[in-house]
Image (cartoon, rainbow, N blue to C red):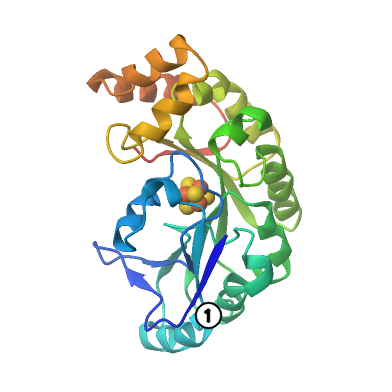
Amino acid sequence: MEVILKKIGSLLNRSSGGNFFTLNPYVGCEHSCRYCYSVYISRWRRRKIEEWGSWVEVKLNAGEILKKEVRKYKKGHIFISTVCDAYQPIEELYQITRDCLSLLIETDFSLFLLTKSARVARDIDLLVKHPNVKVCFSITMLNDEIAKVFEPYASSPSQRIQAGLKLKEKEIETGILINPILPFFTERELENLVSQAEKLGFDFLGFDTLHYIDSFVGGRIKKLYGQFGKEALERLEYAKSPEYETELREWIKEITKGVRIKCEFNF
Ligand code: SF4
């Protein structure tokens, strides 16, 4: 792993609509998920897409910059980890995310934290202190073995769920984003994922599809699907059709009918 230590000039990014900020403590992501849409960042760094997951930039002075920015902006909504994972392995060493959270608990900013890592449970002591924080575990399937093929260095889905339950025990609002719905693989487990999320008492459930099948992640994804045979590949191909999303949406509506958990579509 190539680690680049950086000093930054700004940390919070205002969204294009202007109604929230994004905060990414790192650039790059060791989790190296094969479907990751953030690989587009590789181009900005003059790196090959295949190198995604082998380098990470650490925003060493993130805490110092954030302190100034929260004074300037005063309040708002912050979405943590939009193009990296705030709890990727290197966080154990540099604790940039923890530094940022320590600062944010003293502010009026509401927080939404998305992760594929069980490491977030380390920061329960901080998360419980914030009056308006939501933690969301991004999960594509419950099968740990197949998940490893697509998300080789993220925590396994079962580790994520266990971490989520620890957060729930402390009454931290915690949910699951089924993201991306991998054609064939996630689809086979969709009903089970919904019923598990409800049974385990998660607070919210979101759904999103696999984007960019035909662009920069397309080649990587197709290669992986190829290992699982014709049926998997055909389903991936079908996911490009205009009907796919409509059918998927209808199916999810059917599955989630009557479930006692707030469900949201992101597609
Ligand atoms: S955890 Fe998120 S940002 Fe990191 S590689 Fe996976 S999808 Fe990309």
Q: Would you place residue 81 above or below residue 64 in this image?
A: above
Left or right, 247 with respect to 107, comes to: left
Q: Residue at x 63, y 73 (%)?
A: 95
- As drawn, the residue found furthest toward the top would be 231
Tell me if residue 129 can be seen: no
**Count of numbered labels shown in the rendering:** 1
Left or right, 197 with respect to 14, comes to: right
Q: Would you place residue 267 above or below residue 174 in this image?
A: above
Q: What residue is pinned by disc 1? A: 60
Image coordinates of residue 48 in percent, x first then y, are 36, 51
Image coordinates of residue 5 in percent, x first then y, are 51, 76
Tell me if residue 230 can be seen: yes
Query: Where's the N terminus, which quadrant?
Result: bottom right
Query: Where's the C terminus, which quadrant?
Result: top left
Q: Residue at x 50, y 43 (%)?
A: 33
Depth check: give the residue in front, 247 or 151: 151
Image coordinates of residue 38 in percent, x first then y, are 39, 51
Q: Would you place residue 12 above or below residue 195 in this image?
A: below
Image coordinates of residue 25 in percent, x first then y, are 50, 69
> Which amino acid type is marked by label 1?
Leu
